[in-house]
Amino acid sequence: MTISPPNSHGSEPSICVNPHDPKQVVAVYQPATVAYSADGGQTFALAELPPVPGWQGGGDVSTTFDNKGHVYLSSLHFDKLGSASYWAHRAGRNGIFVRRSLNGGKTWEKDAAIVKTFEGTEPEGRMEDMPRIFADNTPHSPYKGNLYVGWIEWQIDQSVILFSRSTDEGKSFSTPMRISTHAGLPRDDNGGLVGFVGAVDSDGTIYAIWNDGLTITFAASHDGGQSFAPSRVILDVAPPYFGGAASVPGVSRVMGFPQIGVGAHPTNVTGRLYVAWSDFRNGDVDVFVASSADHGLTWSSPVRVNSDPIHDGSDQFFQWMALDPISGDVYVQFYDRRDDPANRKTWITLARSTDGGKTFLNYAWTDAPFESQMAFLGDYTWLTAYDNKVYGVWTEALPTLPVDPSAPPQTQGSIPVRSGTAIRVGTADFSVVK
């Protein structure tokens, strides 16, 4: 179903489900917009989201429920970007904020908590980017209820991953600390650090990953985010950026950065770790999952998630992984072009593993494809799962409207206008699947 208004240009969505009341599902997208459901994702309504005073709308959104059933929205706000892809150069004012809802996303508190702001007058530029919020919802963790945010900070001479935590239900956040031992290059391009994602194990251990060059890097905290062990490389992959038409036709750019999740586990016994990503080691873009049974010390060989023939020239991209905390099943959604020999028409596929990530079954999640004419689909989609029910959110390109012959000549150039976009939500119920 479509949750964005007609003629909109939404992108980069996130979705979460309330573990205390799974009928409550919240989806967000940029520019900072909230859609909420009180019937398990059958219908959605748009919420009134108070602005962050003095700041523009906001993007790079993510959302999570905490262990009390409160839902949070993290967003990035800025006055202007720096130089093209060199965001810290002449960066303007920017900052990361968190807002809270006590009723499943229907209404939101007026006040926003500050995670970090940069005024734009400091001697050296700083640009915060891609914040991700997540919560410790595990019942036996000594840190249950904590909220965590991780993100990229672009600096003049490098890129680093920063991290902050809240122990008071999002009212305040700790002074950000750097958790990336190795710094990346200062451009938002291949070579920079990109794509922070975090997960929490049953004992409160935080696991975090991101792309660093041609690798996936891993860091862990055993004290509720007060400190992290030195980050280290766990997997060799391809660059996280796939470029534009030369790589994935019709898409302005594609990201393959990783996600991490923790499998279900008996009480007080930590779970298996999973990492998902996509790259073009096979020529066309494929989706992969690797797992670890020893807290991230060693990792399995990559398992190819998409089930089309290898080297068939069809791209699968923009993956997102979620672990069901009840069943332990692994789910991955991705854009899929296997049914179009021209590699242009795009469907959405949901993959499921019930054997610890060893094998995946692929399910068609959309009936009709979309075709993009260099639309900006964002940098990510999102997926969540709870008790055999799965909720996904993604961006689709809308058909490009024909040029109005009565329009002024400057609007009728040979360069096609980027099509609009729509935010879609998909649901799946595996409780009836044997």
Image: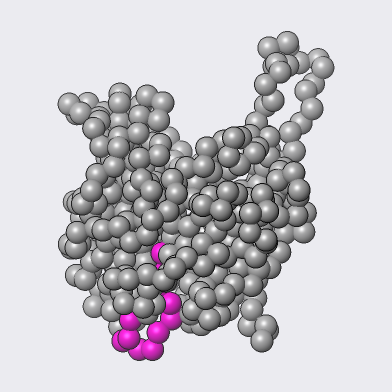
> Is the N terminus in the top left, top right, bottom left or bottom right quadrant?
bottom right
Q: Is residue 410 visible?
A: yes
Q: Is residue 149 visible?
A: no
Residue name at image x 44 percent, y 49 percent: 238
Apparent side of residue 421 relative to residue 104 in the rendered image (left or right):
right
Residue name at image x 57 percent, y 65 percent: 305
Magenta span covers which residues? Answer: 260-270
Give whichever of 185, 81 is nearer the camera: 185
Residue name at image x 61 percent, y 42 percent: 248
Q: Is residue 219 magenta?
A: no
Q: Looking at the image, is 48 positioned above or below residue 56?
A: below
From the image, give the main secondary structure of the stretch colored magenta. loop
Q: Position of residue 263 (x, y in %)?
A: 43, 77
Q: Position of residue 87 (x, y in %)?
A: 35, 31
> Is the C terminus in the top left, top right, bottom left or bottom right quadrant?
bottom right
Q: Position of residue 355 (x, y in %)?
A: 53, 81
Question: Looking at the image, which residue sits at the far right?
Answer: 405
Give whichever of 66, 388 is nearer the camera: 388
State the image quarter where residue 134 is shown.
Answer: bottom left
Q: Position of residue 167 (x, y in %)?
A: 24, 65
Q: Looking at the image, is 410 positioned above or below residue 167?
A: above
Q: Is residue 262 magenta?
A: yes
Give whichever of 425, 160 is nearer the camera: 160
